[in-house]
Amino acid sequence: AQAPAAAPAAPPAGNAATVRLPQVDVVGSTPLLGSGVDRAQVPAATQVLNSQDLTRTGIPSLTGGIAEFNPSVTLNDSSGNPFQPDLLFRGFTASPVEGEAQGLAVYVNGARFNQPFGDTVNWDLIPPNAIASVNVEGANPVFGLNALGGSVSVRLKTGFDYQGTELVGYGGSFERAAGLFQYGKSSGDTAAYIAGGYTHDGGWRQTAGSEVRQIYGDLGWRGDAAEAHLNLTAADNVLGNPGATPEDVLSVSRSALFTAPNNVANKYVALNFNASDALTDTTSLQSVLYYSNLSQRINNGVTVDVAPCGNGSGFLCNGDGSLVTSRGFQPVPDFLNGGPYSGLSLQGTDTNAYGASLQVSNTDPLFGLPNHFVAGASYDGGDTLFDGSQQLGGLSYNRYFIGPGITQDQADLSIAPVRLRTLTNYYGAFFTDKLDLTPRLSVTLSGRENIADIALQDQIGTALNGNHTYDRFNPGIGLTYIVAPQLVAYASYSEANRAPTPTELSCASISQPCQLPNFFISDPNLKQVVAHTFEAGLRGKFRDVAGGRLGYDLDYFHTDVSDDIIYVASNIPGLDYFQNAGRTVRQGVEANLTWRGPRLRVVAGYSYIDATFASPLTLNSPLNPLANANGQIQVMAGNQLPGVPNHRFKLVVDWDVTDRLTVGLSAIAVSSQYLFGDEANLNKPLGGYFLLNLNASYRITETLQAFALATNVLDAKYATYGTFGPVGAISFHELPGGVATNPRDLSPAAPIAGYVGLRATF
């Protein structure tokens, strides 16, 4: 974030000129608030977005804002819901979907936001209009577990940095209607802030409707040397997730789905206390204490390989000829007289997350040289109760599950009710020290010890019981050199790790796979994932270029990941498991240019990301049409990781046409990517796309503003996520004969849409 400009220095006697100190761009050196360092001296790529960046179109969006301005970020819509995207940064993911390899550490007001059960990141829980700033940074060991590819730190507003009232109402395509508000006030040494909103979205695809309700409040106190804040965040959201659909069906109707219902209900409440205390002029303490509860319920319609047994018994059999059984392993009769049958996957996850962090910051000189030292410790705990089951029922003409269903319970545990409690205890001790060897040259040393204790307690039997402990010290070193006022060079090396999640540890057996995330079966050990990152780059600013200020960033990164964890299909249709996948590499370059003039701002960015396997693998992928006779594919070193495009280009333009009228555009071009399940790169990749959005705002009065946004104005037909599905399992009424022959399942992006709204400020 940007520090306020320093107060003018007193002019020399007899000189009426005023000397102003230059504005310093400050970024967080740790997840905790209040320990920032000069961005020019950070030996890694960093990006800070403020609330104006996230609301430039009139509609606030955290993930949308990051994706617009960061050239190395893309959003994958694997779930089919705009409030639950996968955010990919340099080929690493922060996703709300269980089973995604979570490679980014996310913090909100200094508290760990990755959920304990699967390290997932539920973006829908954060009120976007309450965000003060977002810091996106490359790999840094100080940010703890999951910071393999980098970190995202979100700071929410307080009454000290926002005063007044804002009311926003907007609506438009697909029945979207929303009302947002925020209010802040400070009085003496106290302040209060509250923000929230309600959004209804009908969704452009079947079952894609959403109801999003969010609220955030902060009470703050500020003294001469200390500051403290107590804040609460709450959300009650229901999100439709149509997911991927066979490509054959999408060619007829892009709004179609595979099976239904598909929805996620999130109820969330979080308390956060953070404080800072300047003990002396050079020493301060920062602390965070937090608690959150997430209650999540998921209903997901699935296909089943079930049909009447061929022996005339009147019972149902699985595809392998075994009897379909219910609780007590009782045979299930052919209750629909031949079907068709379908399944409904039900899951409930109740998580209590809690933790505390304490750090000390000191700026005393070291060996007579300017120095900035931070050291601290953290604890993050989690207690999760997971319930999962699958019901067998009928299938409607539109591929909806018809109940009431019968709960399946197979003796071989391939499908069985699950009740699992997991306890996670993550401990960390960290430091970072920036020493200015000369006024131009700085060296940064950092490190963090991570300890992860994970306990799994089977609440039905013993198959899932297990205890796992992981520990690792991750070092980091970096240099920055101010070549000239307009040129800063830097280079760094760092390491980071993540422990396998309870989700992954519960589903890591090739002999007893699971249908994520409902049927965890056994508990073999997985190795922790370790990333080694080298990064180097240039950045700088020119004060007067074509009448404006020009800033640039150019960065090269290379991350070598050992024992990466991937989700692999088993030989049993519809069941999968996790395994370590040897080495993977993510490397590339990113460039960003920003020019700001009196009435015009232009941001242009490009990134090239080469994400590959570095170890040969033999993987099961039975639905891949080019797999061998055993349903396997041979992955070679150099094959591209699925879901990671090589090229991204981004452009943002905002033009103040008059003092009242502003128009803008954002353009994104993304190259092709391989489908999940095609790690060997045998099939045609998912095509690239070009997306153009237009926006405008008009200030009607000093307190009232109208705005408009048009997305995908060229109505591009593209998809951001692809995999393979069992298309022969059910009938598709959209197709001739009801038969789909192409196993490619895609998650299509939204068509052209428009929104208009009003903003009132007081």
Image (cartoon, rainbow, N blue to C red):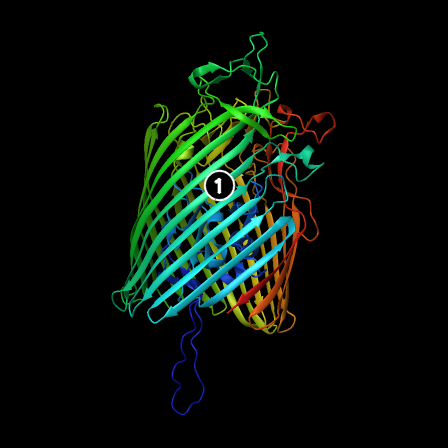
- Determine if residue 738 is in view: yes
In the image, what residue occupies the spot 48% across and 66% down? 165
Q: SS class of the residue under badge 1?
A: strand
Seen from the viewer's position, the closer of residues 370 and 423 is: 423
> Does residue 569 appear to the left or right of 717 in the view shown?
left
Three-letter residue code for mark 1: Ala
- Determine if residue 553 is in view: no
> Does residue 419 appear to the left or right of 366 in the view shown?
right
Seen from the viewer's position, the closer of residues 393 and 74 is: 393
In this rendering, the count of numbered labels is: 1
In the image, what residue occupies the spot 25% across and 65% down? 279
In the image, what residue occupies the spot 70% across and 26% down? 738
> Does residue 498 appear to the left or right of 345 in the view shown?
left
Say which quadrant the N terminus sits in: bottom left
Q: Position of residue 285 (x, y in %)?
A: 28, 60
Residue at the far left in the pictured view? 279
Q: For mark 1, what is the residue?
A: 265
Residue at the far bottom in the pictured view? 14
Seen from the viewer's position, the closer of residues 162 and 356 is: 162
Residue at the far right in the pictured view? 736
- In the image, residue 183 sits, relative to residue 347, either above or below, namely below
Q: Position of residue 374 (x, y in %)?
A: 31, 58
Q: Quadrant of residue 498?
A: top left
Q: Quadrant of residue 362?
A: bottom left
Q: Position of residue 632 (x, y in %)?
A: 56, 24
Please tell me how crowded label 1 is: few (under 14), some (14-19), or many (20+) other residues with Cα within 10 Å: some
